[in-house]
Image (tube, helix red, strand yellow):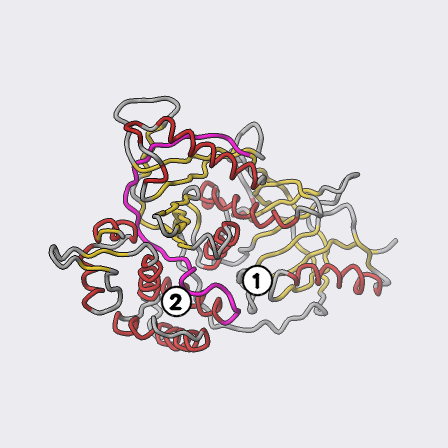
């Protein structure tokens, strides 16, 4: 059981708010002491609090929330969310952010995605003082990561003052920090518990995480959701709602004797209001191949090598790119203006099976005075391409490539594949994270047959 004050801190709300929710029967304490009147909550009730906060983000009144919380059918929930979406569209000057959250949740429900108790919410987070240990890990080696975290926790037990033990704490924290400059496959992590050292004690670190105004938070039960699923859900929210990362991932591992929960956090910046457009189902199909001449354009981005067996890591590469997005935003064509798009450039394979993949954005005014550290610039010269739409889910990318190389190109008498030039995925403003109404294009370079 958790006292009301501690529960309020964990949930990011005030004690007054929890008392108000109690009066409205939205979130009643698990137990009230008959003698002192103190309210106590169970750890699992954080999920209920997150649901209330989520519905508030969508603009529902607390009276409506009490009805929504008892709805068990995803179809009923989706219908009610759709009705609220229509009301918010009549008040566009106030509802940019709320509608983005609403639409994302409705689409998740309609597509059979996560339920509302495993969704992302936006909340403030107070400062957090920690005692930590740090170490470098191999980024893509899950076993090495788990073993390192377990070892660091054991070391904390041996080194903490006053005989403190991490298992006896209300929560422990794992922070992902910067990658190694010498080896991009390595990353530093820190593991710690709340507190402050009475005196410097190497290698223990006094870490203060400052208060944050906008934190995306996803609370989940590790018995029912994998860490990779949670991070993917967080990344999808970032893309869908026009936020940008403003710090590393932080995992708060809550624990008591009966259960455990994990809260995945990441600070964000909302540099642009989410784009609100009527939902339109794409009528484009992969048979709509078009020959286009793309003018020369200067791009800035980052490149990494992949193999055909590691293409599933490309999504993680995009996520890492947006961590540094703020340092180049002023150089780019602004989202929402003519010409804005992004590319996933695939350079021709060399002698081995690896290929270079570049996340790239067009530069404003097609020029650049200097290249920020960690980025590179490439010029795509004027080139003719066959462009094929890839609507809907991610599988459409493979289908589009298959159509180009197995159907369209073999039928051509005038055109052939220009193998020396890169092909790419072009992500226009209509791209919507591979949902049903999403749209991107596959561009394959071509040239006249000799």
Q: Position of residue 89 (x, y in %)?
A: 38, 73
- The vertical placement of 283 against 140, above or below, is below
Seen as rendered, the residue at the extreme right is: 450
Mark 2 surroundings within 10 Å by alpha-carbon count, few (fewer than 14), some (14 through 19), many (20 or more): many
> Which residue is more in the foreground, 283 or 54?
54
User: Magenta includes 433?
Assistant: no
Q: Position of residue 308 (x, y in %)?
A: 71, 48
- The vertical placement of 354 against 162, above or below, is below
Q: Which residue is mark 1?
A: 434
Residue 214 is marked as none
- The vertical placement of 340 against 66, above or below, is above
Task: Please tell me which of labels 1 and 2 falls first in the chain.
Answer: 2
Give the image quarter of residue 86: bottom left
Left or right for 344, reference 79: right
The secondary element bearing badge 2 is classed as helix
Left or right for 118, reference 226: left
Q: Which residue is mark 2?
A: 99
Residue range (magenta):
110-137
Q: Position of residue 18 (x, y in %)?
A: 22, 59
> Which residue is more in the foreground, 50 or 181?
50
Tag 1 near tag 2, CB within 8 Å: no
Q: Residue at x 54, y 64 (%)?
A: 430
Left or right for 429, reference 3: right
Mark 1 surroundings within 10 Å by alpha-carbon count, few (fewer than 14), some (14 through 19), many (20 or more): some
The secondary element bearing badge 1 is classed as loop
Q: Position of residue 329 (x, y in %)?
A: 46, 46
User: Magenta includes 128?
Assistant: yes
């Amino acid at each position: 059981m958790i006292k009301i004050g501690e529960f309020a801190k964990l949930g990011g709300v005030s004690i007054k708010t929890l008392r108000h929710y109690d009066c409205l029967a939205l979130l009643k304490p698990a137990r009230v002491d008959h003698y002192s009147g103190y309210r106590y909550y169970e750890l699992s009730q954080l999920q209920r609090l997150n649901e209330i906060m989520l519905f508030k983000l969508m603009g529902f009144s607390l009276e409506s929330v009490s009805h929504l919380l008892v709805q068990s059918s995803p179809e009923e929930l989706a219908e009610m969310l759709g009705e609220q979406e229509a009301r918010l569209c009549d008040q566009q000057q106030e509802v940019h952010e709320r509608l983005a959250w609403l639409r994302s949740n409705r689409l998740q429900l309609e597509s059979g995605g996560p339920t509302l108790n495993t969704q992302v919410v936006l909340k403030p987070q107070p400062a957090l003082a920690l005692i930590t240990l740090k170490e470098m890990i191999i980024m893509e080696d899950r076993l090495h990561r788990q073993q390192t975290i377990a070892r660091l926790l054991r070391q904390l037990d041996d080194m903490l003052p006053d005989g403190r033990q991490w298992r006896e704490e209300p929560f422990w924290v794992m922070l992902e920090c910067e990658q190694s400059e010498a080896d991009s496959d390595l990353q530093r992590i820190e593991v710690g518990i709340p507190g402050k050292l009475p005196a410097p004690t190497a290698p223990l670190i006094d870490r203060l995480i400052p208060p944050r105004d906008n934190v995306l938070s996803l609370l989940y039960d590790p018995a029912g959701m994998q860490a990779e699923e949670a991070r993917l859900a967080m990344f999808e929210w970032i893309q869908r709602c026009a936020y940008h990362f403003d710090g590393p991932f932080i995992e708060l591992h809550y624990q008591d004797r009966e259960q455990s929960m994990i809260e995945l956090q990441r600070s964000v910046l909302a540099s642009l209001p989410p784009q609100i457009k009527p939902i339109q189902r794409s009528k484009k199909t992969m048979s709509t191949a078009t020959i286009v001449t793309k003018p020369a354009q200067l791009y800035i981005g980052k490149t990494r090598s992949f193999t055909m067996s590691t293409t599933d890591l490309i999504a993680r590469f995009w996520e890492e790119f947006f961590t540094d997005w703020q340092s180049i935003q002023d150089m780019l064509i602004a989202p929402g203006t003519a010409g804005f798009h992004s590319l996933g450039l695939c350079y021709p394979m060399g002698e081995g099976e690896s290929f270079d993949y570049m996340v790239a954005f067009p530069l404003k005014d097609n020029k650049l005075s200097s290249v920020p550290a960690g980025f590179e610039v490439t010029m795509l010269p004027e080139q003719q391409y066959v462009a094929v739409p890839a609507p809907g889910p991610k599988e459409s990318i493979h289908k589009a490539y298959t159509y180009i190389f197995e159907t369209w190109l073999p039928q051509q008498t005038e055109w052939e594949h220009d193998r020396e030039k890169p092909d790419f995925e072009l992500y226009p403003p209509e791209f919507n994270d591979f949902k049903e109404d999403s749209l991107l294009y596959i561009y394959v370079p071509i040239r006249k047959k000799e």
